[in-house]
Amino acid sequence: MSASVGIVGFRGYSGAEAARILARHPHCEPVLLEHRADGGDEAKLLRKSGIRRAPASADSVKAEGLKAVLFATPPEVSMDLAQKFLDAGAVVVDLSGAFRLGTAERYKQWYKEEHTAAGLLGEAVYSIPEFHRAAARGARLISNPGCYPTAANLAIRPLVEAGVIDRKCGIVCDAKSGVSGAGRKASLKTSFCEVTENFSAYSMLNHRHVPEVLMTSGVEESEFSFTAQLIPIDRGILETIYFRPAMPMSAAEILEVYDKRYHDEPFVRLYQAGHVPDLRAVQRTNFCDIGVAADAATGRVVVVSAIDNLVKGAAGQAIQNMNLALGYEETAGLL
């Protein structure tokens, strides 16, 4: 029998992606949980899709027999509903930033809002599965990482752990994202006329995803420079990461570090030395592709990390985490 999995925020890009993946999952079926009063025309189309629908409430968790619920919502919605759904017996995987930073103080510092569910911060498991798999298994509340930190941490953490990076010289992460990363809500900055034929940087020096990189890869804020940039495509993140190695190393030697760390990982793909991924290679997949270029003579290294922001950066990784929490094979529905 298929397990029922609820999706709150199914009209957004990440929520819709989660519904698409769960519809082909071998062990699960999606249930769309409505948390807005106005359904609009989208609701009529979704009813015709044949996917079950229910209100976003604890009663629905029980009535629909939901084993898990994915929150593809703003943080305030996740904070309002998470405890109620946990009490109703569902595993919660939250795609927002509500439970990522560990403390209410850190949340206020980076999100500029008060945390209204601080009692859950101690229970929430932040999980990039490649690093936090053991903690995610059997967890009740999983905080799904942000899209930018997923690509950054998968590229940076193995090198920090192996002592490859000369941290005194710092790490520069130049990150480009498609427009879907800003969400579906209409705004001037993501409108067609503003985005097309354009390329812009935003949230310089204070992007709310920065602390996820600091916490996960173990670097200091003074060592890490991050700039997010919006490019006129619908989906995908490509991060170009620059650093100086602690000792002269070739691209092949750096790739050996990655290969040792990711040899058995199903969703991390490495490129041959001197070759790097592009966005087409990862779009609509749960893969993170990593490539390295290095010049040992001058001490310059460039790592390129690419993901689909809606899949490995959001819904796909959330289902990867859900699979771990529910005891399914980690790749279920994703390969």
Image: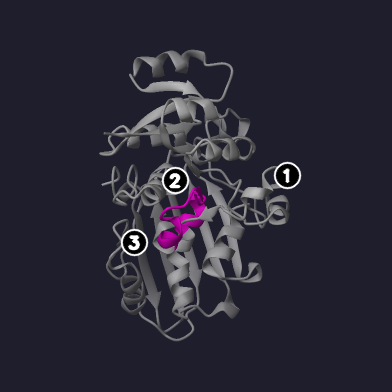
Please tell me whether mark 2 or mark 1 is closer to you in this view.
1
**Residue on which disc 1 sits:** 113
- Whether residue 19 is visible to the viewer of this picture, yes or no, is yes
Magenta segment includes 251:
no
The magenta region covers 132-151
- Measured as percent of width and height from the top left, residue 312 is found at 40, 49
* 106 versus 246 height, above or below: above
Please tell me whether mark 2 or mark 3 is closer to you in this view.
2
The secondary structure type at the circle numbered 1 is loop
**Label 1 – label 3 distance at C-alpha:** 39 Å
- Measured as percent of width and height from the top left, residue 326 is found at 37, 47
**Label 2 – label 3 distance at C-alpha:** 18 Å
**Label 2 – label 1 distance at C-alpha:** 24 Å
* 248 versus 311 height, above or below: below
Going by the numbered disc 1, the residue's amino acid type is: Glu
Toward which corner of the image does residue 205 lie, by quadrant? Answer: bottom right
**Residue on which disc 2 sits:** 309
* 301 versus 124 height, above or below: below
Toward which corner of the image does residue 5 lie, by quadrant? Answer: top left
Q: Earlier in the sequence, mark 2 or mark 3?
A: 3
The secondary structure type at the circle numbered 2 is loop
Label 2, residues with CA under 10 Å away: few <14, some 14-19, many ≥20: many
* Quarter placement of the N terminus: top left
- Whether residue 11 is visible to the viewer of this picture, yes or no, is no
The secondary structure type at the circle numbered 3 is loop
Q: Residue at x 25, y 39 (%)?
A: 26
